[in-house]
Image (cartoon, rainbow, N blue to C red):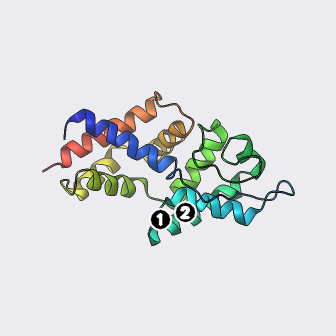
């Protein structure tokens, strides 16, 4: 696979995980700010957004975990102000770039519930149609990036800062590791 395709694929994989799957049946996250905010509906909507259109048991569990962690850290009002929730407190289908504080909490919730390296590895295996040594790729990525570096890259991409050095480092590591794990 050409280096540029791997680089773009790596960035898309990272961003796809960072932004969830950008699909939702609607709902709101919440600790209880405002009479219209239904915390259970918010958590359900966020879980669906994170898990994607056709989740398996792992994605469903990760989505539920993510929604619980995020709503424990960010209020419905903050999520609405960030554009994650609409005026009716329903989860939007495609969240906009997030403010730094919400992006940080989102990244924390995401990484508390889903192993980024495992998700990136699954995605790379799928993109390469199995033409990748998954163990070598994951091992390489874990050696190249610390959890804090991954967290910073995820938060930066959630904030729309795709030119951030952390995003570039993540993308380069994914590309290099994919190239090194190709048979």
Residue 26 in which image quadrant: bottom right
Residue 83 at x, y = what percent? Answer: 68, 42
The quadrant in which the N terminus is found is top left
Residue 118 at x, y = what percent? Answer: 37, 58
Query: What is the C-alpha distance between the residues marked 2 and 1?
Result: 6 Å
Residue 148 at x, y = what percent? Answer: 49, 44
Q: Which residue ends up furthest to the top in the rendered image?
A: 163
Position of residue 51 relative to residue 154, above or below, is below
Foreground pick, 109 / 85: 85
User: Does residue 86 appear to the left or right of 116 in the view shown?
Assistant: right
Q: Are marks 2 and 1 in contact (CB under 8 Å)?
A: yes
Foreground pick, 23 / 37: 23
Q: Which residue ends up furthest to the bottom in the rendered image?
A: 57
Count of numbered circles on the image: 2
Crowd rating for badge 1 (residues with CA inside 10 Å; few <14, some 14–19, many 20+): some
Residue at 51% in and 52% down:
20
In the structure shown, which secondary structural element does the residue marked by tag 2 occupy?
helix
Residue 127 at x, y = what percent? Answer: 28, 51
User: Which residue is the site of mark 1?
Assistant: 59
User: Does residue 142 appear to the left or right of 59 in the view shown?
Assistant: left
User: Which residue is the site of mark 2?
Assistant: 63
Residue at 12% in and 51% down:
183
Crowd rating for badge 2 (residues with CA inside 10 Å; few <14, some 14–19, many 20+): many
């Amino acid at each position: 696979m050409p280096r540029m395709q791997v680089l773009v694929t790596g960035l898309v994989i990272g961003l796809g995980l960072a932004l969830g799957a950008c699909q939702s049946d609607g709902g709101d996250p919440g600790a209880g700010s405002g009479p219209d905010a239904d915390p259970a509906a918010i958590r359900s909507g966020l879980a669906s957004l994170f898990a994607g259109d056709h989740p398996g048991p792992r994605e469903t569990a990760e989505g539920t975990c993510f929604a619980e962690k995020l709503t424990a850290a960010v209020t419905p009002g903050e999520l609405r102000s960030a554009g994650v929730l609409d005026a009716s407190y329903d989860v939007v289908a495609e969240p906009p770039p997030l403010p730094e504080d919400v992006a940080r909490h989102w990244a924390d919730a995401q990484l508390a519930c889903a192993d980024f390296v495992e998700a990136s590895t699954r995605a790379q295996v799928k993109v390469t149609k199995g033409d990748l040594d998954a163990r070598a790729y994951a091992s390489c990525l874990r050696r190249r990036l610390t959890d804090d570096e991954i967290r910073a890259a995820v938060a930066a991409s959630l904030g729309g800062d795709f030119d951030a050095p952390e995003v570039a480092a993540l993308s380069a590591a994914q590309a290099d590791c994919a190239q090194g794990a190709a048979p």
